Image: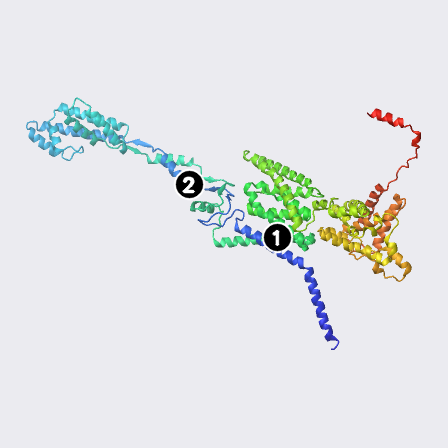
Amino acid sequence: MAKIKPSKPAKKQSQIRRKLNKRIKNKPLYINFAIMIVCFIIVFSTLNSSSFYGIYNYQVDHVVKEDIYLHKDIIDEVATEALKEKKALEVQPIMYVDFSKQVESKKALTEFFTRLIETKSDYASDLELMKRIYAGIERRNQYALTPEELMQLATLSVEKLNLIQNYAVDITVENMSNGLTTADLNSAITNIENYVLSQTDITDFEKTVLIKFIKGALVENKFVDEIKTAEAIKVEIEKIEEVTYPKDMLFVSKGTRLDEKTHYLLMQGGMLVESRVDHYIMLLGLFILLLMLWGILHLYLSYFEKTVLSTTKKYGILMSLFLVFFLSAQFFYEMNPYLIPLPAFSVLASIMITPTVAIYFGIGLLIIISLWTGLSAYTMIAYLMTIMITRALVKNIKTRSQMVGIGLYVSLVLMLFTLTQNLINKSDLSQLPFDILFSAANGIICTIISIGIMPFFESFFGVLTPFKLLELSNPNRPLLKRMLIEAPGTYHHSILVGNLAETAAHDVGANSLLTRVASFYHDVGKLERPYYYKENQMGSDNPHDKLPPQVSANFIKNHMTYGVDLLEKNKLPKEIIDVVKAHHGTSLIKYFYHREQINNPEVDVTKFLYGGPRPDTKEAVILMLADSVEAAVRSVEQPTKDSITQLIDKIVNQKIAENQLATAEITFNELEVIKASFLKVLSGIFHERIAYPEINMDQISKTAFDKTDEKES
């Protein structure tokens, strides 16, 4: 038991240390997981706070937060019904004349005068009696004649009565022949009164009673034919088109307060959430859909791009780009659907991360934007084509002018697609020039955004882009300029190593620009004591001749430590520093080890080893081999193709024997390609030259050169 007790705390401490190391190792995963959740919430909240595929959550009197475009035709039934009612009122009623009314009026007049004449005949002997009897008989006459008027009428002669009767019958029949409506009666009576009053063959009393006869005889005899009028209204109503608000129309502008009519129409068009339950159901569907898409995108990263998912910087860049282009999509969409700078996302993600991630997440971004804005299928296809073409063109991009070229290709693709879409759909050609103009502007905007936003990511995230590498390769950079002045031999060596390494990296598919720039800076540590290195020594004086081999080895090793410190102080990217760190690996400083071994056979070899780390990338391996090969070739007195080949093979085999390439992501086939690339470059540098014969210039007359000058002049 006494032996077990002390081991428990030690074992416990060991477990805690392992857990702590594991947590530190997994820290980027935790950070990236948090970033993923935050980005998911932002995307979900954005989609939830606006429309989801054209369905909005607004009530009457709510202020609309965005322009609402109809995603289908909406019929305004109320307005259509109002138009029909208005049209029905505008239709002239179809009339018919009831001639029986005319006959009845004529008959009544004739019977009245017949009774009057008969009464006059029956009581011709007693005029006063006749007047009283007649007034009593006709006291309820339809012509509104008073007893006094009846008595006076009875005293008129038969001839006068016949004249008045003829006037009354003729005028009544004439006016009722064309039919009289209730509205026509008043105007007709007014005209008749004027006519009667203008007659000279009758007295004023006779005119008065005549007018009363006519007023009593005239009745409405023109009526509306309800059946025919209804048929006419039906025909006219059928001609009326429904009041329709077409698809893609700007129906409600941003900032407008929603009134009842507009709310009702949006509800009729299925563009509003009808209840709180519907809203929650929609949110659940949106959450599941977005979660599924989010999961698929990150599943791809976990299987094929693990470095992105496990690196905070790369994943942070990816999510930042994703959010920036997602949140800005609505702004550009409102101007024109073909103006969304989606290709810029593909370009930036390809340059700063990888082209495969760019195309995969570009498609995911396109899907989410289409859900948000309701992009048509044709427009989605157009953007998909731009993502594909940027993926193809962004390979080996090195200059900003190449980005301008990519933007022009994007514009060309969108313009051609816009044209073909309009031709296929037979769309309104008046809109075509504007769509083509916006399509052309997309490529220009993408170029401006890509070039403008990239320096921000380069500085904020410390991302290394081809453009940053080109800036770092400029000979006027402070460190390179110092090398040129203070250590010209090292500078020349670095340039040659860069040429070797760049060619080899290109041939094996590594990052050739990164390898070249790292080569330029790989020996900046020699600036501390440049004269301690052979390439910078101007004569036979060598300070190492006066130093013990181990001290000299320490000076040589220190150029790695000082170089890394110098690069970090000058804020060079981590990718370059990592390659520089590993360009000697843990290899042996052979020259000084051999010198020490002569005097001390039991020498500790670890004191003559570089501190590492060993190279683990293709770029670092290539730099290690290029550095060793270039330095070794200098020692060959008469380099030939065969001797250079043997030297390259020897150096590569030594590095393998020293176990320097054990952790590197490189194959033997790629090593053969690298050796062939080195041989190709070095053969060009150390090619055979023609041995020019010695000529005695004194034997050539100087006048010959003068004559040549005269001919040239």
Outermost residue on the top side: it is 201
Dot 1, crowdedness within 10 Å: few (<14), some or many (≥20)?
some
Dot label at residue 265: none
Q: Secondary structure at mark 2?
A: helix
| Placement of the C terminus among the 4 image quadrants | top right
Q: Amino acid at mark 2?
A: Ala
Q: Give left or right: position of 577 versus 237.
A: right
Q: Give left or right: position of 283 versus 663.
A: left
Q: Is residue 630 above or below residue 145?
A: below
Which sits in the foreground, 260 or 652?
Answer: 652
Which sits in the foreground, 157 or 461?
Answer: 461
**Residue at image x 11%, y 34%?**
136
Q: Secondary structure at mark 1?
A: helix
Gap in Å between the C-alphas at discs 2 and 1?
A: 45 Å
Q: Which residue is mark 1?
A: 294
Counting from the top left corner in percent of width and height, residue 41 is at 57, 54
Between disc 2 and disc 1, whose residue precedes? 2
Q: Amino acid at mark 1?
A: Trp
Q: Is residue 590 above or below residue 424?
A: below
Q: Is residue 284 visible?
A: yes
Q: Is residue 618 visible?
A: no
Q: Which residue is mark 2?
A: 79
Counting from the top left corner in percent of width and height, residue 172 is at 22, 28
